[in-house]
């Protein structure tokens, strides 16, 4: 099977649902644009994600031939054993206890942001709510000043929406430090400040993620400053991809008028299921690239060493062999948590618990702030996806607010 589908083209990937359905029906593996191999089905995607010996994560979303020094790679660009060790560090820094301790801050921040939405009036909930909430939560966990959150969000957005994720460069230079010097310089300064405190015996921020990253070791050695910088950048940009898009997609679904809002108001316990169903049906990250290191097979189909393999997690999340009525948002789906949006096996995202907490608290605060009928899509609102090729999420969320019990 050959097709011109290019998952690195935002215009194609974000409107590819009918094509992905056809590809799944034709087989577990499809040859697409530029000779890439796209894994279409759930079982085969899980198999590739589990096999870290055959399928390398090192190239990440980079274009063929782009090399990133190991010390500058984010977690999504590392292979075992380095990936396993660094992921363990990240998991230790983002323990459930750490995330739980931040829930009060996340809740008060959500309430503060929503209180600033004018009633009655018109607002865009992306800059007003769905983007700043996860950003501020991440900055809080890192221990950075809250006043710096807008600047960090702007730098992270510039990076994500540029060609850097694929090329490792901008017009200013190659590599993160040269391509985005203000962003990199800020992180370096904070790392140096915290490292100096620890060296002087002043462990005044023991539970903040940056302190944990500096104190933890990999193979009896601390992470280098450049590795810490890469991990911190990973956390900041992750808050503006996975978590922001998760929250935006879920708000968009709630406002769509399909009965989801009414169900959640009747049964708030369904919010966790709504989060998983949103992650399945509208995954913030659409696919995961890999490089095949040796001749192998995927679902009985041959894959040659050197092939670029695209794990189609978005396609797997709608696999008819796993999910009944896969294109519908069903709050009572019994296996919705089997989605692959956060990865699988050794590559499950260590920030998943934080993303879920932000989404749960954010949606709860939204429903508490705006009674039924008080928040509606603006008459001129039309869904438009963010510009980034690997993301699924709303560029805007234009809404109109009303005082309770008022009709248009």
Image: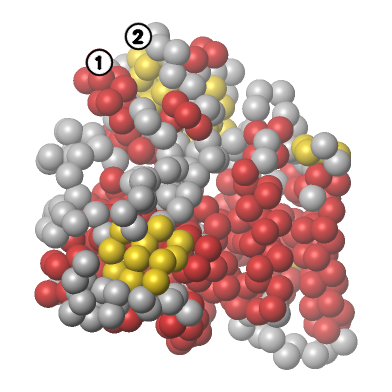
Measuring 31% from the left and 58% from the top, which residue is drawn there? 377
The dot on residue 1 is 2
**Which residue occupies the foreground of this view, 8 or 75?**
8
**Is residue 277 something that shows in the picture?**
yes
Tell me the element at label 2. Answer: loop
Q: Which residue is mark 1?
A: 26
Horizontal and vertical percent for residue 337?
Answer: 26, 54
**Could you say which quadrant of the image residue 387 lies in?**
top right
- The quadrant the N terminus occupies is top left
**Could you say which quadrant of the image residue 225 lies in?**
bottom right
Measuring 43% from the left and 39% from the top, which residue is drawn there? 286
Tell me the element at label 1. Answer: helix
**Which residue occupies the foreground of this view, 53 or 144?**
144
**Mark 2 residue crowding within 10 angstroms, few (<14) / some (14–19) / many (20+):** few
Spatial separation of the CA atoms under disc 2 and disc 1? 8 Å
**Which residue occupies the foreground of this view, 405 or 152?**
405
- Image: 306 above or below 375: above
Of label 2 and label 1, which has the lower sequence position?
2
- Image: 70 above or below 375: above
């Amino acid at each position: 099977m050959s097709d011109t589908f290019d998952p690195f083209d935002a215009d194609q990937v974000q409107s590819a649902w009918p094509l992905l359905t056809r590809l799944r029906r034709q087989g577990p593996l499809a040859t697409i644009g530029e000779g890439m191999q796209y894994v279409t089905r759930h079982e085969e995607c899980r198999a590739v994600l589990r096999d870290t010996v055959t399928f390398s994560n090192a190239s990440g979303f980079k274009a063929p031939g782009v090399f990133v020094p190991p010390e500058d790679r984010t977690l999504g660009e590392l292979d075992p054993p380095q990936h396993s060790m660094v992921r363990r560090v990240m998991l230790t820094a983002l323990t459930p206890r750490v995330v739980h301790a931040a829930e009060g801050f996340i809740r008060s921040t959500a309430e503060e942001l929503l209180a600033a939405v004018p009633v009655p009036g018109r607002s865009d909930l992306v800059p007003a709510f769905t983007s700043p909430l996860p950003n501020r939560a991440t900055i809080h966990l890192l221990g950075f000043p809250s006043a710096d959150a807008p600047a960090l969000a702007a730098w992270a957005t510039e990076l994500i929406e540029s060609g850097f994720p694929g090329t490792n460069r901008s017009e200013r230079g190659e590599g993160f430090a040269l391509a985005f010097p203000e962003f990199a310089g800020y992180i370096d300064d904070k790392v140096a400040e915290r490292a100096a405190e620890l060296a002087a015996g002043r462990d005044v921020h023991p539970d903040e993620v940056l302190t944990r990253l500096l104190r933890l070791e990999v193979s009896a050695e601390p992470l280098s400053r450049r590795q810490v910088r890469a991990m911190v950048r990973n956390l900041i940009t992750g808050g503006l991809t996975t978590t922001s898009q998760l929250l935006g997609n879920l708000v968009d679904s709630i406002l769509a008028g399909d009965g989801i809002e009414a169900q959640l108001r009747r049964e708030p316990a369904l919010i966790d299921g709504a989060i998983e169903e949103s992650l399945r049906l509208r995954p913030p990250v659409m696919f995961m690239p890999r490089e095949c290191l040796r001749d192998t097979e995927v679902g009985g189909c041959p894959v040659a060493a050197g092939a670029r393999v695209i794990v189609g997690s978005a396609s797997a999340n709608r696999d008819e062999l796993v999910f009944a009525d896969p294109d519908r948002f069903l709050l009572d789906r019994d296996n919705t948590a089997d989605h692959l949006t956060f990865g699988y096996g050794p590559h499950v995202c260590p920030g998943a618990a934080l993303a879920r907490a932000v989404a749960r608290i954010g949606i709860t605060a939204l429903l508490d702030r705006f009674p039924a009928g008080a928040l509606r899509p603006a008459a001129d609102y039309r869904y438009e996806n963010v510009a980034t090729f690997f993301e699924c999420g709303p560029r805007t969320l234009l809404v109109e607010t009303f005082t309770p019990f008022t009709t248009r």
